[in-house]
Amino acid sequence: MKTLFQSLFLLCISVSSFSAFAATAKDTHQIVVQLTRSSDNYAHMKTFFQIDKVLSEIGENKLKIVVVAYEDGIHALTQNSRAAQMLTKLANRGVSFKACKISMNAWDLTEDDFPLEVEFIAAGAPEMIRRQLAGYKYWKP
């Protein structure tokens, strides 16, 4: 039979462990954003504006956002896209951009067609799934 002191000690340890976990979980939320096809020519630019607004409202220190581009969405990450300037701004705010090499090959794009802020991944769809399995929340603006 546990003494009152032992019970209180265990309760304090449990609460402090939970508090440390809760604080960590609340500090940074991981979000993965999918950029694929769209019939709207400005959809990707709108997505970048929404990400910018979310970072301003919630805080850059509370969010880790990864943008995965594949299929037609790959064009939003190129240097000559209308969104290139916004991409740089978001990258400076901590957003990561991933370009699918399969889509790049399909559109005859090379790594030189993209700004330095863009990282390259083997395939977009599996990356989306991997991120979600790792705890990222899916957001398709």
Image: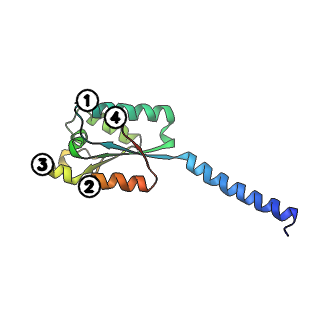
The CA distance from mark 3 to mark 1 is: 22 Å
**SS assignment at label 3:** loop
- Whichever of callouts 3 and 4 sits on the residue coming sooner in the sequence is 4
87 in relation to 112, above or below: above
Amino acid, disc 2 = Ala
Residue 131: which numbered mark, if any?
Answer: none
**SS assignment at label 2:** loop
* Quarter where residue 34 is shown: top left
* Quarter where residue 82 is shown: top left
Amino acid, disc 4 = Phe
Amino acid, disc 3 = Asp
Report which residue position mark 3 lands on.
Answer: 108
The CA distance from mark 4 to mark 2 is: 21 Å
Report which residue position mark 1 lands on.
Answer: 42
- Whichever of callouts 2 and 1 sits on the residue coming sooner in the sequence is 1
**SS assignment at label 1:** loop
The CA distance from mark 3 to mark 4 is: 24 Å
Q: Are marks 2 and 1 in contact (CB under 8 Å)?
A: no
Report which residue position mark 2 lands on.
Answer: 123
**SS assignment at label 4:** helix
Q: Name the image quarter holding the C terminus.
A: top left
